[in-house]
Structures are given as C-alpha cells and as structure tokens.
C-alpha cells in the first residue's frame, strides 16, 4: 500500500493556533499542547488511510472526519497527497464556502 504525503494548510495551522489560544487559559499549556499534538498525529495517520470520513460539499473532493467528539477535520485527498484544509474545534459552524 502506497503512503500519501500529508500537508497541513496555512488555514489549518491558524486553526491549530486558535485552538491552543482557546485552551491554554482554560486547561493549561501542557494539556492544550498535548491535545493539539494528538490532533496532528491523527491527521498524519491519513498517510496510510486517507479515504475516511464523509464527503462534504459538492466541490473540491472534500471530506470531513470527527476527532474525539471535539473537533472536525476537513481535508482533501489528491494524487498521493492529503491536504488538511481546516480544523474546527467544539461545534464551530463550518462554512464550506470559506474553505
């Protein structure tokens, strides 16, 4: 089985930074960073099994998958590559047009 390259978009990186900013005052720096590390590790797992989750929207071949009932990861699977487009935390409203 061929492995896919996982790329985290700049928007997804900004989402990660927002999650850390949100969690640090509420849960502490260590817990916030551990949680974000778990999300990133989960995303890197798409290199072996990229076609999980649910197809969302009608354009750009986007998929979405939940993470620990706390986040939604939106991504695109292409030729040999998985691009993490956005990471929405805790029920944040997902507007597919802004992805």
Image (cartoon, helix red, strand yellow):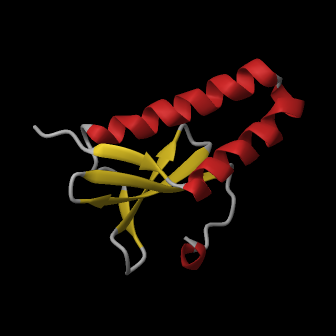
Q: Is residue 9 left or right of residue 93?
A: left
Q: Residue at x 61, y 73 (%)?
A: 95
Q: In which quadrant of the rendered image does the C terminus lie?
A: bottom right
Q: Is residue 18 left or right of residue 47?
A: right
Q: Residue at x 79, y 35 (%)?
A: 23
Q: Residue at x 74, y 37 (%)?
A: 20
* Image x and y of residue 56, in percent: 41, 69
Task: Residue at the far right: name it.
Answer: 25
* Image x and y of residue 46, in percent: 33, 42
* Image x and y of residue 3, in percent: 20, 39
* Image x and y of residue 7, in percent: 42, 48
Q: Residue at x 61, y 48 (%)?
A: 13
Is residue 39 positioned above or below 6 on the image? above
Q: Is residue 53 left or right of residue 38?
A: left
Whether residue 89 is visible to the viewer of this picture, yes or no, is no
Is residue 59 positioned above or below 81 on the image? below
- The quadrant holding residue 62 is bottom left
Task: Residue at the far left: name it.
Answer: 1
Q: In which quadrant of the rendered image does the N terminus lie?
A: top left
- The quadrant holding residue 22 is top right
Q: Nearer the viewer, residue 92 or 5?
A: 5
Task: Residue at the far top: name it.
Answer: 30
The mark tally for this picture is: 0
Q: Nearer the viewer, residue 4 or 71?
A: 4
Whether residue 29 is visible to the viewer of this picture, yes or no, is yes
């Amino acid at each position: 089985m061929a492995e896919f390259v996982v790329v985290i978009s700049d928007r997804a990186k900004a989402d990660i930074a927002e999650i850390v900013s949100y969690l640090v005052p509420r849960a502490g720096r260590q817990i916030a960073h551990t949680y974000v590390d778990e999300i990133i590790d989960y995303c890197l797992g798409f290199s072996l099994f990229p076609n999980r989750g649910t197809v969302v929207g009608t354009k750009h071949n986007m998929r979405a998958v939940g993470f620990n009932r706390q986040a939604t990861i939106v991504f695109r699977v292409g030729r040999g590559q998985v691009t993490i487009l956005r990471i929405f935390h805790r029920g944040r409203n997902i507007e597919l047009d802004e992805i």
